Amino acid sequence: MAACFLLLLFFVQTIAEKRILLNDPDLIQSQIHALERKVEDVVAKNTDLSTKYTDLTTKYNDLFAKYNTLLTKTNDGGVFVRWGRKDCPGNNTELVYSGFAGGSWYDHIGAAAEFVCLPRDPDLTSKFTSSYAFMYGSEYDTSDFGHENGDDLPCSVCRSTVHSSVLMIPGKSSCYDGWTMQYHGDLVAGEYQNRAATQYICLDEHPEALTAGQRNDNGKLFVPVKAVCGALACPPYHNDRYLTCAVCTKLY
């Protein structure tokens, strides 16, 4: 009984103390201040979140603008020559023009090195009377490409509508990761015994010949390129093995 009485007395005292505390103005004021501080913390956090949201929105708009700029730049497109063909390979490309492969005479010591793709509708002039260089047509200098020695080469200038970077990879018939194949074929250049310098270009794997261009007039000549071991590491290369090539494009 005594224990029950003491327990009842303890509950009565506790309730009385709580009533006193609830009626204590200092306590109420401190609780109000605590609530005010919590409200201030919530407002501060909300302001911080709003600032972060504004920053994220600004960054998103900046990235979106850069993306649109990138799309605009890619619309400029990369340009490449498809040697040995009158058309472009498809694959998001468009034909700029189709023409004739040309360059300097194969044995002139002052010859220009590069191959060029000449248009079918030239604008010519006769205003010069001084020294001059020459422009010849280009010919297959071997029957290994499926055409007779002396057959003339077509070419086409192509523009990618989605990719801005263009790369010709000698010795590969495929593109590396991230690059898109435009065409592949055989690496060609001028014959090594000729005096005129040339350059390495990529002849399409299915080359064509120009109509009515079968006469062997020489000019700028195409022959396949083979590896020579020594300074060139073998393996991976092999002596007297011919090199392939690939023309690849990339977004940027």
Image (tube, helix red, strand yellow):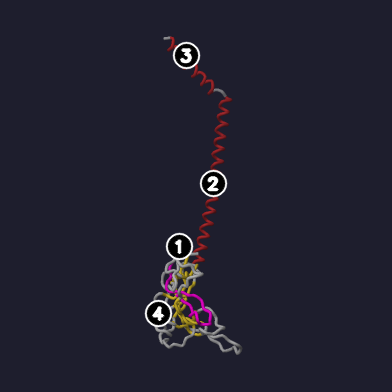
Residue 204 can be seen, yes or no: yes
Q: CA distance from mark 1 to mark 3?
A: 84 Å
Instruction: Count neighbours of disc 3 (C-alpha within 10 A) and say few if under 14, some if 14 to 19, many if 20 or more.
Output: few
Residue 77 can be seen, yes or no: no
Residue visible at 55% across and 29% down in the picture: 31
Q: Which label belongs to residue 247?
A: none
Disc 1 secondary structure class:
loop
User: Nearer the N terminus, badge 2 or badge 3?
Assistant: 3
User: Nearer the N terminus, badge 3 or badge 4?
Assistant: 3
Q: CA distance from mark 4 to mark 2?
A: 71 Å
Q: Which of 7 and 102 lies nearest the eye of the viewer?
A: 102
Q: Which label belongs to residue 144?
A: 4
User: Nearer the N terminus, badge 4 or badge 2?
Assistant: 2
Q: Which of 3 and 137 lies nearest the eye of the viewer?
A: 137
Q: Which of 66 and 103 lies nearest the eye of the viewer?
A: 103
User: Nearer the N terminus, badge 2 or badge 1?
Assistant: 2
Q: Which label belongs to residue 178?
A: 1
For discs 3 and 4, the disc positioned in front in the rendered view:
4
